[in-house]
Structure formats: structure tokens, C-alpha cells
Image (cartoon, rainbow, N blue to C red):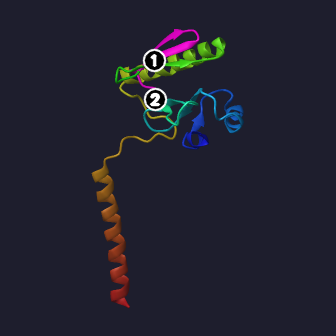
């Protein structure tokens, strides 16, 4: 399970340092892990399942819909599938529901603004053909210099 932490850019939970040591000690428990990354979608969560090897990872997008029914947090994803997360602690359920709601509202706001400006570490969309053309141009420049060097010697 620590693999999920390694592919994440940063842990969104306020107890991220505690979470890593907690995972090493109690990897059989079922709880969501939040992460942030520099590409879109920027946020997501992973529900680690203690009853099977299949974990569930969901991106937090503008289409995610939540409903809090203590001790469950129900959500519907963009594919219109409905899932539930059970929490032992009701306060933790409410705190995670608030965090998910805030991140979803942020994604909805960014979608209304047309994506807005990119965040730190997030690059603008790149045209692959333009990149390849530039690489070919640079390669040809270097090859021409090498050919001129050897032809003048």
C-alpha cells in the first residue's frame, strides 16, 4: 500500500506524516487516502480495501457528487456508479466529507472559469507535433555542426 503514497505528489490530509507510519503498522485497515498531483485531475482518493486486494481509486472531478449519511459517505462518480465509504469515527466522516465537497467545488469553479491559469508545477497543454518538430530541428542543427566539423578537419 505505500506504493500509493509514492506516486502522489503530496498528501492532502493534515496528518500526512502520521498517515505514512500508520500505513506501515496497520496496512489491513480500510480507509481513504487523498493525494494531489500536478496534472489534471489534480486531486483524487484511494479507498484501501482490507477484505480483498482490489482497492478503489477515484479522481475528484466536477462530476463527483457526495451525500453524507453518518457513518457512511456516499458518492456518485462521472460514470454514474454509486459507492459508499464507511467510517468508524463520525467526526472523521464529516471532516472528510467537507474536504471532498471543497475539492469538488474547486473543480466545478475551475470548469466554469475555463480551466483558469495552470497551478505551480502544472504545465500548459503541449502540442506533440510541435515538440517533435522542435526536436527534429535541434537534432538537424547538431548533425550539421558535426558534419561541418569533420569536413573541415
Residue positioned 65% across, 35% down in the render: 27
Q: CA distance from mark 1 to mark 2?
A: 10 Å
- In this figure, which residue is indicated by the disc labeled 2? 58
Q: Quadrant of the N terminus?
A: top right
Residue that appears at 45% across and 17% down: 75
Magenta region, main secondary structure:
strand
Residue 60 magenta-drawn?
A: yes
Residue 66 in the image: state x and y as whole percent: 47, 14
The quadrant the C terminus occupies is bottom left
- Tag 2, which secondary structure? strand
In the foreground, 99 or 139: 99
> On the image, which quarter does residue 135 sit in?
bottom left
Disc 2 crowd, CA 10 A, few/some/many (<14, 14-19, 20+) = some
- The reply, left or right, for residue 126 in relation to residue 121 is left
In the rendered image, the vertical position of residue 125 relative to residue 30, given as above or below:
below
Residue 101 percent coordinates (x, y): 51, 16
Write down the region rendered in magenta: 58-76
- Residue 41, image x and y in percent? 43, 32
Residue 130 horizontal side relative to residue 19, left or right: left
**Residue in the picture at 58% in, 11% down:** 71
Nearer to me, 64 or 23? 23
Residue 125's disc number: none
Q: Picture quarter containing residue 64?
A: top left
The numbered mark at residue 75 is 1
The residue sitting at the top extreme is 69
Amino acid at each position: 500500500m505505500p506504493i500509493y503514497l509514492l506516486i502522489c505528489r503530496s498528501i492532502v490530509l493534515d496528518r500526512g506524516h502520521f498517515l505514512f507510519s500508520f500505513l506501515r503498522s496497520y496496512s489491513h485497515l480500510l480507509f481513504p487516502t487523498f493525494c494531489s498531483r500536478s496534472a489534471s485531475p489534480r486531486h483524487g482518493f484511494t479507498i484501501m480495501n482490507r477484505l480483498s486486494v482490489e482497492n478503489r481509486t477515484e479522481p475528484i472531478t466536477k462530476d463527483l457528487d457526495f451525500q453524507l449519511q453518518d457513518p457512511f459517505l456516499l458518492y456518485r462518480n462521472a460514470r454514474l456508479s454509486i459507492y459508499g465509504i464507511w467510517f468508524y469515527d463520525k467526526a472523521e466522516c464529516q471532516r472528510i466529507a467537507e474536504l471532498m465537497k471543497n475539492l469538488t467545488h474547486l473543480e466545478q469553479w475551475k470548469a466554469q472559469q475555463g480551466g483558469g491559469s495552470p497551478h505551480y508545477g502544472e504545465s500548459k497543454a503541449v502540442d506533440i507535433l510541435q515538440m517533435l518538430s522542435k526536436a527534429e530541428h535541434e537534432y538537424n542543427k547538431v548533425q550539421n555542426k558535426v558534419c561541418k566539423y569533420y569536413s573541415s578537419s
